[in-house]
Amino acid sequence: MKFLKGSLIVIILIVIASVIWYASYKKDMKELEDGLRMYLIVEKGMDEQDIISITARRSKMPQYPVVVLLKDNPKEVVYTYRDEQWVQLWPDP
């Protein structure tokens, strides 16, 4: 009976930790997407209507790539937030 209680507690802790990690991950991705949207609109002077989508992706690198699709450009434009600034990774600026 003690083993069952211990196992149940461990499983519950693992589930709680997983939910907290996932919520933190989604929050970080949302902050990156919102930050890039503000950068493109305020700094680059783009119209919000020209931005089709902005999606942050997981990656092996320490900085997450954020992919932008624009109305006038069918190709993806990839940015990352590095050293307190947005840097375009692909295609080369």
Image (spheres, helix red, strand yellow):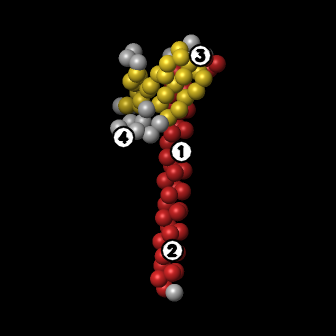
Q: Secondary structure at mark 2?
A: helix
Mark 4 or 1, which is nearer the eye? Answer: 4
Q: Cβ–Cβ below 8 Å for labels 2 and 4? A: no
Q: Secondary structure at mark 3?
A: loop
* Residue at 41%, 27% in the rendered image: 85
Tag 1 residue: 26
- First in residue order: circle 1 vs circle 2: 2
Real-space CA distance between mark 1 and mark 3, rounded to the nearest whole angstrom = 26 Å
* Residue at 58%, 27% in the rendered image: 53
- Identified by mark 3, the residue type is Lys
Hey, which residue is sitting farthest bottom in the picture? Answer: 1
Q: Secondary structure at mark 4?
A: loop
Residue 66 visible to an observer of this rendering = yes
Real-space CA distance between mark 1 and mark 2, rounded to the nearest whole angstrom = 26 Å
Q: Is residue 11 above or below residue 72?
A: below
* Residue at 38%, 36% in the rendered image: 63
* Residue at 36%, 31% in the rendered image: 83
- First in residue order: circle 4 vs circle 1: 1
Q: Cβ–Cβ below 8 Å for labels 1 and 3? A: no
Real-space CA distance between mark 4 and mark 3, rounded to the nearest whole angstrom = 29 Å
Q: Is residue 70 left or right of residue 80?
A: right
Hey, which residue is sitting farthest right in the picture? Answer: 49
- Identified by mark 1, the residue type is Lys
Residue 45 visible to an observer of this rendering = no
- First in residue order: circle 2 vs circle 4: 2
Q: Secondary structure at mark 1?
A: helix
- First in residue order: circle 4 vs circle 3: 4
Q: Position of residue 37 (x, y in %)?
A: 55, 26
Tag 2 residue: 9
Q: Is residue 50 above or below residue 26?
A: above
Real-space CA distance between mark 4 and mark 1, rounded to the nearest whole angstrom = 17 Å
Q: Residues within 10 Å of mark 1 (few under 14, many from 20)?
A: few
